[in-house]
């Protein structure tokens, strides 16, 4: 073979190795060199009517010439059998998308065609992680342009499946970062019990120790097909499901992946990502919660207002109804941080336990009331009375039980105390009498991720004191848990250098 345009055929061998993030094929180094391929090249595998772009690993000896070994992520997703003859050829990105990324790095504006080329190449895996990272990072250096955000949102939304429930579909979304802030698992069953359609989808946590997806997965299955989601919504007026299996804005998932590595994402990508997912999910009315504080994701009111304006511009262009709230985020909503503990708090509120988190309940009810007002269901005092009554009467709890049943949860009647919390912990105690001045939420997130959050659902932090609380020497300030002893030790060392709390002088 004299150039990369020519293809060759190989027999498949399916191996039980999973990468989770990448679609990987392994070919012999001899085939690689024979067909003039280079490092970071990709191959397009053609099987029947499908063409799949894969990342390539090389083998010196194990894989013979004329063979291609497929990771489990590939052959299961695309139903490729063992010992099947497939065509392989060099896969290249659209030159338009590469040039457009160069333009964006230089601060130039992109046309609709250039944005669509980038999104299409990201979706089809033709761009490397390096290319996607450069494109994503541009958002840190250049101010967002409304027209570009709208184009990016539309292109990303239509890169995958789009739902239409043929009626008003409502959603609530928080941009994250604030620990112990799991209100969605209270609001969704509460409003669904009022016969409001609440189809909730979510991605992996990017900047939070545990987002809604991680918390819901403690109780029930979150992976469903589009047809299964339609049945869930028809039966329960709601669902709590992962967006990736639904192929919702798949190009956006690739951008999330590169953002995950440093637990940061540019505001422009965050805005476009949220709107694309909501639009693709068929949402007609959406409440956006933007927590603001110096140690939160949005550090100032000025930035919060700018982001709110961007949201407002985009939702009008998409024909959606939206309300954006700037909420106070000077500290975690409650004391528990981590999926398992946050679910325990949600269940305590839904089941109206005496030891429930009053602050978390108050915020959830406030946001639920705002949604009722946004969709003209009820207003002012009446809206507040409705959400309070529905929660106290256990209607929200019953709806959550129905959701757990429908989503194949192990125990639809689970009690808060049945959430398994490990006893192997480390306690950080006070060295003298003091009073807490501030709580650094960025550092909380750093410590939580060091412990294993959000991937380890059993890792957690408990903050025993909040702002302006006084404590005495030897009282427990913080309790940590990780299933990995080394991660626990690393987190303790980090706390020795910098505390989550700052103290009044």
Image (spheres, rainbow, N blue to C red):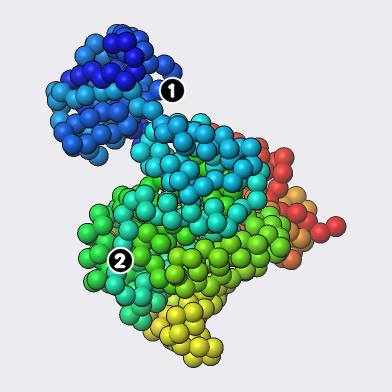
Task: Give the answer, above or below, for where 208 lies relative to 46.
Answer: below
Q: Could you tell me residue 1's position as x and y percent? A: 28, 11
Q: Could you tell me residue 298's position as x and y percent? A: 65, 57
Q: In this view, does 370 lie to the left or right of 343?
A: right
Query: What residue would you read off at disc 2?
Result: 164
Q: Is residue 431 left or right of residue 340?
A: right
- In which quadrant of the rendered view does residue 419 lie? bottom left
Q: Could you tell me residue 226's position as x and y percent? A: 26, 57
- Residue at x 58% of width, y 70% of height: 325
- Residue at x 25% of width, y 54% of height: 225
Q: Nearer the viewer, residue 66 or 222?
A: 66
**Viewer can see residue 176:** no
Q: Is residue 458 left or right of residue 300?
A: left
**Viewer can see residue 75:** yes
Q: Could you tell me residue 269's position as x and y percent? A: 54, 50
Badge 2 marks a residue whose secondary structure is: loop
Give neighbour class at mark 1: few <14, some 14-19, many 20+ (Cα, 10 Å): few
Badge 1 marks a residue whose secondary structure is: loop
Task: Give the answer, above or below, for where 158 lies relative to 318.
Answer: above
What residue occupies the far bottom of the structure in this picture? 382
- In which quadrant of the rendered view does residue 410 lie? bottom left
Give neighbour class at mark 2: few <14, some 14-19, many 20+ (Cα, 10 Å): some
- In which quadrant of the rendered view does residue 161 lie? bottom left
Task: Give the answer, above or below, for where 239 lies relative to 62.
Answer: below
Q: Nearer the viewer, residue 167 or 177?
A: 167
Query: What residue would you read off at disc 1?
Result: 40
* CA distance for labels 2 and 1: 39 Å
């Amino acid at each position: 073979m004299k150039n990369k345009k020519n293809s060759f055929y190989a027999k498949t061998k399916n191996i039980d190795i999973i990468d989770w993030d990448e679609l990987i094929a392994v070919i012999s180094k001899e085939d690689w060199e024979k067909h003039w391929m280079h490092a970071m090249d990709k191959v397009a595998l053609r099987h029947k009517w499908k063409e799949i772009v894969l990342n390539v690993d090389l083998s010196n000896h194990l894989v013979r010439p004329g063979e291609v070994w497929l990771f489990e992520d590939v052959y299961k997703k695309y139903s490729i059998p063992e010992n099947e003859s497939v065509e392989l050829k060099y896969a290249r990105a659209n030159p338009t998308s590469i040039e457009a990324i160069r333009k964006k790095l230089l601060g130039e504006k992109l046309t609709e065609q250039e944005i669509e080329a980038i999104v299409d190449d990201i979706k089809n895996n033709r761009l490397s992680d390096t290319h996607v990272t450069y494109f994503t990072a541009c958002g840190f250096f250049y101010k967002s342009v409304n027209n570009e955000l709208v184009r990016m949102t539309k292109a990303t939304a239509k890169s995958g499946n789009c739902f239409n429930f043929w009626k008003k579909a409502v959603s609530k979304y928080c941009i994250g970062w604030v620990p112990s802030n799991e209100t969605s698992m209270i609001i969704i069953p509460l409003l669904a019990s009022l016969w409001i359609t609440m189809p909730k989808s979510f991605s992996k946590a990017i900047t939070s120790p545990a987002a809604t997806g991680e918390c819901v997965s403690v109780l029930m299955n979150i992976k469903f097909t589009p047809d299964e989601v339609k049945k869930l919504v028809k039966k329960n007026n709601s669902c709590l499901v992962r967006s990736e299996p639904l192929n919702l804005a798949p190009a956006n998932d690739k951008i999330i992946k590169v953002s995950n590595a440093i637990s940061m994402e540019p505001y422009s990508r965050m805005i476009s990502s949220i709107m694309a997912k909501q639009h693709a999910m068929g949402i007609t009315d959406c409440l956006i919660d933007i927590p603001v504080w110096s140690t939160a994701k949005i550090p100032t009111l000025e930035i919060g207002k700018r982001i709110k304006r961007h949201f407002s511009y985009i939702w009008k262009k998409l024909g959606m109804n939206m309300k954006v709230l700037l909420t106070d985020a000077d500290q975690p909503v409650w004391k528990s941080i981590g999926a398992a503990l946050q679910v325990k708090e949600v269940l305590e509120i839904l089941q109206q336990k005496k030891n429930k988190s009053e602050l978390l309940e108050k915020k959830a009810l406030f946001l639920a009331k705002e949604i009722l007002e946004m969709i003209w269901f009820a207003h002012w005092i009446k809206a507040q009375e409705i959400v309070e009554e529905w929660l106290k009467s256990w209607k929200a709890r019953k709806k959550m039980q129905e959701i757990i049943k429908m989503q194949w949860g192990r125990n639809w009647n689970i009690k808060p105390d049945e959430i398994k919390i490990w006893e192997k912990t480390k306690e950080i105690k006070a060295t003298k009498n003091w009073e807490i001045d501030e709580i650094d939420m960025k550092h909380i997130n750093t410590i939580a991720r060091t412990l294993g959050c959000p991937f380890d659902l059993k890792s957690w932090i408990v903050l025993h004191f909040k702002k302006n609380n006084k404590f005495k020497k030897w009282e427990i300030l913080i309790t940590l848990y990780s299933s990995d002893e080394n991660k626990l030790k690393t987190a303790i060392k980090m706390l020795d250098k910098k505390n989550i709390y700052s103290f009044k002088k």
